[in-house]
Amino acid sequence: MENLEEYKKSEEICEEIIGIEGIGDEEPKEQCQKQKHKMKIPKNIKMKNIIKHRKNSKSEAALSPEALLVDLDTIEGIADSPGDPEVGCQKQKIRIKISEKIKILDFKKWQKYSKSPGTPSVELDFNGNLEQNRLAEAQQQLVKAEERLFVSKEGARAEDEEDKLHMDYEIFVLHLRLAINDSFSEDNQETLKSALTSILKEEAQDRRWMEVAVDQRPVWRPTRCRQIHDTLLQTTVEERMKNADEQENKADMLSTSLKREVFRMGKQVQKDLLTVVRNLRERYPPDFDICRTYAQLYHKAFSTRLQELARSQISSEDCFYILSWIVEYYPKDVLKHKELEEHINSSSLGPLLPEEDLKRLEEQYFSYKENEIRNWLSNAFEKEVKKWSDGIEPELMDGYYFNNLAVDVLPLVDGAVKDVNTLLSCENKARSLLKQLDSFLLSYKTSLEELVKRKQENIPKTLTANLVNIYQFRDYVQKPEHPFSEDTRTACLSTLADLKNICHKYFLSRIHTELKPLYRKLWTQVWFTGHCEVVEELVKALENKIDNFKELKSVCREELLAELHVEVMVEYVRRMMKRKLKLKSKEQQEAAAEFICHDSNKICSVFAKVGSREEWLCQILPKLSEILRLQDPGSLQLEIVTLARDYPDISEQHVLALLNLKTNLSSSDLRRIKGCLSENRGTLDTLESSTSFFSKVLIKRKII
């Protein structure tokens, strides 16, 4: 294949040589002028031998420089006419033309087979240095020839020498271009280093000639090799980005052509910049600042293409992908690569997209996310409500009922919020997305209220599963790392509390309805005379009711039973303060006090067994029993003040209802205790950990 390509190039050279016939019929003077500028071959020179070589040769040797030069000698023999100086001049021009064409033809072949630039065993001429890719040495030879022709005053320079030197410079620049263009090839690194050295020397030579009058300079000055280098680098980068590795395996997994293109370009940037840092950086002199140069070129090429894509009609999915590269992958994975970060100042590169284009993408993406979350919430909730209406029983997993509403919705919402927060760097937009949870929970509340009004067998199981949902939603809203606004967080927690209360009320109201006959026996004569039987019956009933919640998730069961614990204690104290039992003597009061403590232990132990952590409730009845037990008005007065300190929500009516159980207290004693409570209530240091209790104990009629 290589022989065929070289054969074709040889044909082109031969055709060019043959094609420059046509000036042989002109006057000698005109011929000389054209020869100086075009170096054309006179018509009377025959090219039969070259054509023969081109047609008959089938090996690489037949197209070698030596073979073509033999043909040139044959041509010279045929065209040789004594006394014809024009023809002699032409022969010299032809030799230069063909010789230089052959250099171009065989350059790639030299690159492949010649050794890397090094110190030769013998001193090489210009052509030899080019063959060995010793561009720095070849450039120095050109400079010496240039100095000899244009600076030395030894004699007038010959035009043919100047033309030959000009041609040598063109061939040198061609080799230079090829070396730069092949910068990323591992086999080209030493040649590139030699080329870069020659560029610096050419730049210095250009500066020297800038001090000389234009008409005194060589026509090829300035050569602008550095400018050629920079232009070639830009072209090379653009081509490599345009032809980004199509075989990038991971790109094939992406769903759209835009994603695949962006991915390949981004990976090409990283791959090539790593090559620059690992290989090219060592070849380049510091003056080139090559890491920064390549980073800017790749950044510009990537930015240009992203702008084109961003300004086209792209889907929201592709919009998200472009934003991900702009905000995440490019600055963090590519530019901040551990090998690149030290050598590339990413802050100096500027943004990948102009502000206008970026804002347009951000608005498109945010609008898409808003609609997406709205649809997620709506579809998930409609699906769940339909299950309720159809009477579909929730699933049982790990021993408790649950449904997938929170599990399905929250990860999607959270992912969208994090994406918006990351890609748009705008917490207000993230908060705006979370605000949709508030309206969603309000709809949830309305539907749950309607559910509990129905008479369906599966309602208890459905509510049991919904308590798990409510807990999961509440846990998400409460976490400070989720960027709710304070108003939205407060509103959501309030709605979630209402949702929990709907479920709790459904369960607890039915329990209290069934326990009501047992509650009625408390603090009656039946209770006082047959105390143990009444409480045992109540405790046994509680245990049976609590056992019905074993299919409720433990954390939700604890909350429900804690509320039941509170309500049972509230009902106990309410029955106590109804004054259906009068304790006339000290003995009766002491006995009642003992009964209260016994009841407290029994009730609290039931709830402790099932995981209730409301230990503070276990202190209430013993403190009330102490008031019944004490007989001294002064001691009573002190105990009442202490009780008011521990439970600030206890009212004067609660205190009087409690004291009215002790019928042996005089009216004056009651007034003094009441007055002392009023005087000290404003100065009491209430406990910070105090929990509301007595405010739940409702007393219907005023006690005087």
Image (cartoon, grey):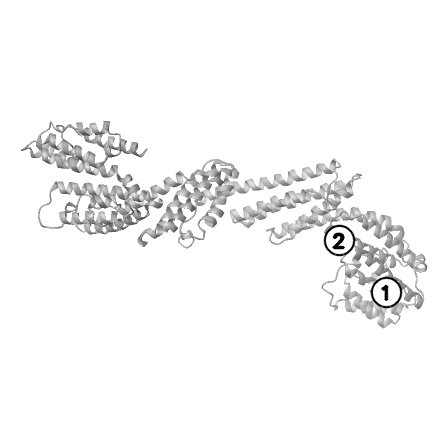
Expressed as whole percent of the image width and height from the top left, the position of residue 475 reads 66, 51
Q: Looking at this view, is 71 or 388 the one in front?
A: 71
Q: Is residue 526 visible?
A: yes
Q: Which residue is mark 2?
A: 558
Q: Is residue 101 visible?
A: no
Q: Looking at this view, is 554 or 657 the one in front?
A: 554
Asked where in the image residue 382 lies, by quadrant, the reply is top right
Q: Which residue is mark 1?
A: 625
Residue displayed at 56% across by 49% down: 428
At label 1, which amino acid type do we have?
Ser
Expressed as whole percent of the image width and height from the top left, the position of residue 67 reads 20, 34
Q: Quadrant of the C terminus?
A: bottom right
Q: In the figure, is residue 229 to the left or right of 614? A: left
Asked where in the image residue 448 lies, by quadrant, the reply is top right
Expressed as whole percent of the image width and height from the top left, the position of residue 409 reads 64, 43
Residue displayed at 37% across by 43% down: 237
Mark nearer the N terminus (2 vs 1): 2
Q: Secondary structure at mark 2?
A: helix
Residue 237, above or below 87 = below
Q: Quadrant of the N terminus?
A: top left
Q: CA distance from mark 2 to mark 1?
A: 28 Å
Q: Looking at this view, is 110 or 183 the one in front?
A: 110
At label 2, which amino acid type do we have?
Glu
How many numbered marks appear?
2
Residues at badges 2 and 1 in contact (C-beta under 8 Å)? no
Q: Secondary structure at mark 1?
A: helix
Residue 11, above or below 636 = above
